[in-house]
Every structure is written in structure tokens, then in C-alpha cells.
Image: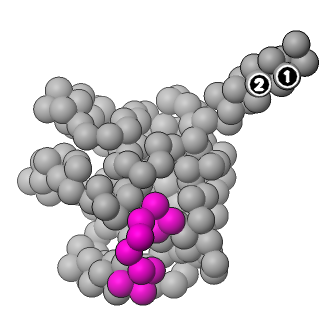
């Protein structure tokens, strides 16, 4: 009986800690051994304020899963003062060597300077925000840092349209 209640209580606490639509998620910081920006500086989730942000949290082995959504975003040419993108790479979710991923991220940062590329070497966001591990997660944040939308896995055309509508209604 006690074990069953402990399992239920643990599940309830886990759900409470998960990132929720309409709320600012718990603060997370990625620096040093835990990760950080592609340029080696620290990144924290308080940076998701001031404009609408789309955050991609991606297992490198699933990097192309939501390429259709990325393509739509590129074609929209949103004003960089009101819209931004963050790509957080779940480096602990792959067998690929960190050095190779870091080199690729540095190249991507130069090719796409409007996107902030971030390394998560210890699954910090998976644990703190209860994101889907070994997947491609899409999160949209409002100017106030509140989560407006989340989707784990491949987005359908309907989900892409829904996400675009949310972005455009908050710009």
C-alpha cells in the first residue's frame, strides 16, 4: 500500500514539475560541463523573453524530424526584433562524439546567426522541464516567457499551421 502511494505521489510531483502551457517554466541554466551556447558562453531560460521564441530541443539523431516546420519558419522572414529561434541539442541522447557536434554547431551558428545554438550535455531540460528525450521537441514562448505551445515528435501539417497561427497572433 505504501509503495503504491509513493508511486502515485512521485507521478503527481513529476506532472507538477513538467513545463505547462500558460506558465513560465522553471529557470534552467546551461554552462560549463552541462553545456551552454555554441560559442561557449552560458545560456539560461530567462533569455526566452522580450520576443516570441521557438525553441527546438533535438536529439542529433532526429535533427530532420521537424524540418518542414523549420522550412516554413525560414520562408516567413519574421522581424528579428519580435521573433527568435533557439536550437538546443540534447547531446546526451546520441552516440555521436561531442567534439563533432560542437564543430557542427559552430558552423551552424555562423550560417544562421539569428538562431541561438545551445548544447545540453546532461539532459538538463529533459529533467527540469520533463521534455521528451531522444526526440524532436518544439516549444513556443511568448514575449513574457510563458509557454504558448509544445509538441513532442514530428509535427503534422495541421500542427505546423497551428504553431504558425500561435506565433503570428503573439508577434
- Label 1, on which residue? 3
Q: Which one is in front, 35 or 135? A: 135
92 part of magenta stretch: yes
Q: Please report the residue visible at 23 percent of the width from the left and 37 percent of the height from the top.
A: 155
Percent of width and height locating residue 65 = 23, 50
Q: How many marks?
A: 2
Identify whether 72 is placed above or below 13: below
Q: Is residue 72 left or right of residue 113?
A: left
Badge 2 vs badge 1, beta-carbon distance below 8 Å: yes
Residue occupying image coordinates x 63% and y 80%? 32
Q: Nearer the viewer, residue 166 or 90?
A: 90
For residue 41, above or below residue 117: below
Image position of 86 (left or right of 126): left
Which corner quadrant of the image does residue 98 belong to?
Answer: bottom left
* 111 in the magenta segment: no
Q: How is the image coloured?
A: one colour
Which residue reaches farthest top? 1
Where does the image place residue 10, in percent across and percent down from the top left?
76, 29
Region rendered in magenta: 90-100
In terms of image quadrants, where is residue 156? top left
Element carrying mark 1 = helix
Q: Position of residue 34 (x, y in %)?
A: 62, 72
Name the residue that disc number 2 marks: 7
Q: Calculate the distance from the C-alpha at mark 2 to the C-alpha at mark 1.
A: 6 Å
In this rendering, which labeled residue sits more in front, label 2 or label 1? 1
Say which of 21 and 61 sits in front. Answer: 61
* Image point (90%, 18%), residue name: 2
Label 1: how many Cα within 10 Å (few below 14, some 14–19, many 20+):
few
Amino acid at each position: 500500500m505504501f509503495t503504491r502511494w509513493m508511486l502515485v505521489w512521485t507521478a503527481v510531483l513529476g506532472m507538477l514539475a513538467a513545463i505547462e502551457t500558460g506558465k513560465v517554466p522553471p529557470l534552467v541554466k546551461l554552462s560549463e560541463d552541462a553545456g551552454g551556447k555554441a560559442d561557449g558562453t552560458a545560456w539560461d531560460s530567462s533569455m526566452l523573453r522580450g520576443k516570441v521564441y521557438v525553441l527546438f530541443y533535438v536529439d542529433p539523431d532526429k535533427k530532420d524530424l521537424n524540418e518542414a516546420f523549420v522550412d516554413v519558419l525560414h520562408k516567413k522572414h519574421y522581424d528579428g526584433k519580435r521573433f527568435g529561434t533557439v536550437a538546443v541539442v540534447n547531446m546526451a541522447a546520441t552516440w555521436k562524439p561531442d567534439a563533432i557536434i560542437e564543430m557542427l554547431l559552430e558552423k551552424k551558428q555562423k550560417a544562421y546567426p539569428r538562431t541561438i545554438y545551445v548544447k545540453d550535455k546532461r539532459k538538463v531540460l529533459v529533467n527540469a522541464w520533463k521534455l521528451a528525450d531522444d526526440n524532436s521537441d518544439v516549444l513556443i514562448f511568448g514575449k513574457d516567457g510563458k509557454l504558448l505551445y509544445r509538441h513532442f515528435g514530428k509535427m503534422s501539417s495541421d500542427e505546423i499551421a497551428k504553431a504558425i497561427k500561435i506565433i503570428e497572433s503573439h508577434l
